[in-house]
Amino acid sequence: MGNLTLGIDIGGTNFRIGAVDAEGNISYFEKNSSRIFDEGDVVEIIHKEIEAYMERYGIRDSVIAAAVGIPSIVSKDKKTIISTPNLKGFNNIRFSDKLQEKLGLPVFLDRDVNFLLMNDMKKLKIDNNKTVLGFYVGTGFGNAICINGELYAGKNGAAGELGHIPFYEIDEECTCGNIGCSETRCSGKRLEFIASKYFDDVAIRNVFKYHGNSPILTKFVRDLAIPIATEINILDPDYSIIAGGVVFMEGFPKDILVQAIHEKVRKPYPEKNLEILFSEHDQQSGIYGSGIFAHEKIKGIN
């Protein structure tokens, strides 16, 4: 095979890796549990995983770079993982330089949702000169912001932490350490709590299928609209993309979510001409986004 990049997607639940060619074709996809990082030096663990992966498929000489997406605050220079509430061991690590030194390959780091948004924009054929917001409801509540083709990072790399805007009258501690973050109400973790408390007769994947008309679940869906509408009101985007495992559960009432967003967004604009798109991901979406990003970065270097 020709030049390949490694697309690596470390989520709150799964660790995924694949080899990506310049056209975006993915080979040798693998998935493992993110629990492999629970004990020990996470840079050393991922280094060993990558080396073993390349050895397994005999592609060491074909790999030109790697890109890692992670559900974290990542420093503006994309070198340091600052804070990762939903994963152990990924706080305050000078990550990309250390991994790059061990691998002997360029390593690029960013928030996982930034790579997902890049994937979604390509898939949905959205022009790079648009303002696009990505809302990703999975284990937590992820958010990515693209303005005129540039992913917005903010002063410290902490922009887009929409799961951690404060909600009124919520005294529950968030995994980030603050009290009353939106993620305590708008996330897969919250849905797990609701399902175990009120709907333990079905597996969580079927909770909307069998109990979608429940007022408790309707409130959960309508609560998701609050952070989404908040950011739409601030940035007046061309497109808002909603994705993630929660919104693509069987029976999830997308119509109720869209209606609630319209109700909460400022009138007449941006509500009047909102463009809300849903994008269904598969296990390889993050790998595609990160792998293509690595190709583009290498091309820019050369």
Image (cartoon, rainbow, N blue to C red):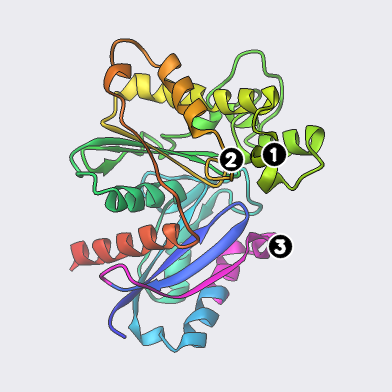
> Is residue 36 rendered magenta in the image?
yes
Residue 210: numbered disc: 1
Question: Which of 200 and 79 lies nearest the eye of the viewer?
Answer: 200
> What type is the residue that disc 1 sits on?
Tyr
Q: Is residue 230 magenta?
A: no
Query: Residue visible at 41% across and 19% down?
Result: 262
Numbered tag placed on residue 251 in the rendering: 2
Q: Magenta segment, which residues?
A: 22-48
Percent x, y for residue 165? 52, 25
Q: Is residue 226 left or right of residue 7?
A: right
> Tag 3: Cα neighbours inside 10 Å, few (<14), some, or many (≥20)?
few
Identity of the residue furthest to the bottom in this view: 58
Closer to the camera: disc 1 or disc 3? 1
> Of the residues under marks 1 and 3, which one precedes in the sequence?
3
Tag 2–tag 1 contact (CB < 8 Å): yes
x, y percent for residue 76: 37, 44
Q: Which quadrant of the figure has residue 187?
A: top right
Mark 1: secondary structure? helix
Identity of the residue drawn at 31% across and 73% down: 21
- In this figure, which residue is indicated by the disc labeled 3? 39
Q: Spot the residue most to the top.
A: 267
Tell me if I can see residue 189 in this picture: no
